[in-house]
Image (tube, rainbow, N blue to C red):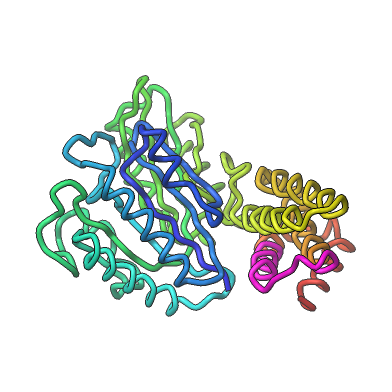
Amino acid sequence: MVFEAVPNFSAGRDGALVAALGEGPDVIDVHADADHNRAVVTLVDASAGRLADSAFRRVALAVARIDLAGHGGVHPRVGAADVVPLVPLAGAPMAAAVAEARRLGERVWRELGVPVFFYGEAAGGRRLADIRAGRVAPDLGAAPHPTAGAVCVGARGPLVAYNVAFAGLPLTAGRRVAAAMRELPGVQALAFALPGGRTQVSMNLTRPDETGAPAAYARACALAGAPGEPELVGLCPAAAAGPGCDGGLLEARLAALAARRAAAEAAARGGEEPARLAGRLAAEARSLGALEAGQDAILGGAERAAALARVLRAGRLASPELEALLAAAASGLRTAVAPATAARFERRVALLDRWLRSA
């Protein structure tokens, strides 16, 4: 099983704090934005319990270091550690994510004294928009913490945080674009004024299997009447990737994490041969982490994740957790291979499918 946590913190301008929030062996991405004054950290683990504990440590750090009284940024927020969702990946059970989200929220209130709102599957489908609008009371606690506000803790399926910025587009026009974007399946959208005369249409693609980055980008540009600058916030499932998603493929980062951990284990063994293997694995981790979103690269990434599993077994570096990461990576990347690409590389895809069935 593989689980993901994507805590959002109200800190995008303090480089030292962002670095501290993004430190740790389970971190696969850190995205900081000075205009929004927000940082998004992506964590993964085979254990939902360990993942919740890792998220808690970062929430505690944010509560200790962020004072909302002096906070400025265009993004709406309710707290220093604003949103903490747990996400099951690759068939992991939502029930486990819900249980750990509830435990995490109770711990935040009990140990940190910060009120907690539950949302998503951890609260019967409650939406963040209702919390931000003040339509619901905290589930734990009452008055906001004097410096840290409140925390929204939830469980949900994968989503894509995706922005498109337009130069010279008036904010009023940007708001019309955002309103029209909300007509697409699973799209939540707002418009923000950015420095330099830009307007950003900021979106959450909550059903990326129906509306992914390619459709969102094309529609936003058509509505704005001009090409925009795409930006991926955090990571994106490969099957939903599009403009601006190069180097941000979730499954490729899972494979990179497995390679990085195996490299560290090989290096710790000492000796010339383990050192050489550690170097090759570290190089593969860097390459996979930067994987592009094109079809040829995605198919190659799926094959590389499958091959890595065999390399780790041969080197006696495999573990159930690393196997789970690589299986999730290979199957997710394989799902993103379009039928036309599969037809073009029929033999390669058949071999990959055979491995996936036997894994």
Q: Residue at x 28, y 68 (%)?
A: 107
Please state if 325 lies on the left or on the right of 96 as rendered: right
Q: Is residue 116 above or below residue 184?
A: below
Q: Is residue 146 above or below residue 302?
A: above
Q: How many marks?
A: 0
Q: Position of residue 329 (x, y in %)?
A: 67, 62
Please state if 161 lies on the left or on the right of 138 as rendered: right
Please state if 227 lies on the left or on the right of 340 as rendered: left
Q: Which residue is at the front of the view, 20 or 166?
A: 20
Please state if 301 lies on the left or on the right of 88 as rendered: right
Q: Is residue 248 magenta?
A: no
Q: Residue at x 58, y 43 (%)?
A: 245
Residue 340 visible (yes or no): no
Highlighted magenta segment, given as a residue range: 313-331
Residue 289 visible (yes or no): yes
Q: Residue furthest right?
A: 347
Q: Which residue is at the front of the view, 358 or 46?
A: 46
Which quadrant of the rendered structure holds the N terminus? Answer: bottom right
Q: Position of residue 26 (x, y in %)?
A: 54, 57
Residue 90 position by quadrant: bottom right
Q: Is residue 320 magenta?
A: yes
Q: Residue furthest left?
A: 143
Q: Position of residue 132 (x, y in %)?
A: 21, 54
Q: Position of residue 98 (x, y in %)?
A: 38, 75
Q: Residue at x 27, y 32 (%)?
A: 172
Q: Which residue is at the front of the view, 61 or 347?
A: 61
Q: Residue at x 24, y 64 (%)?
A: 111
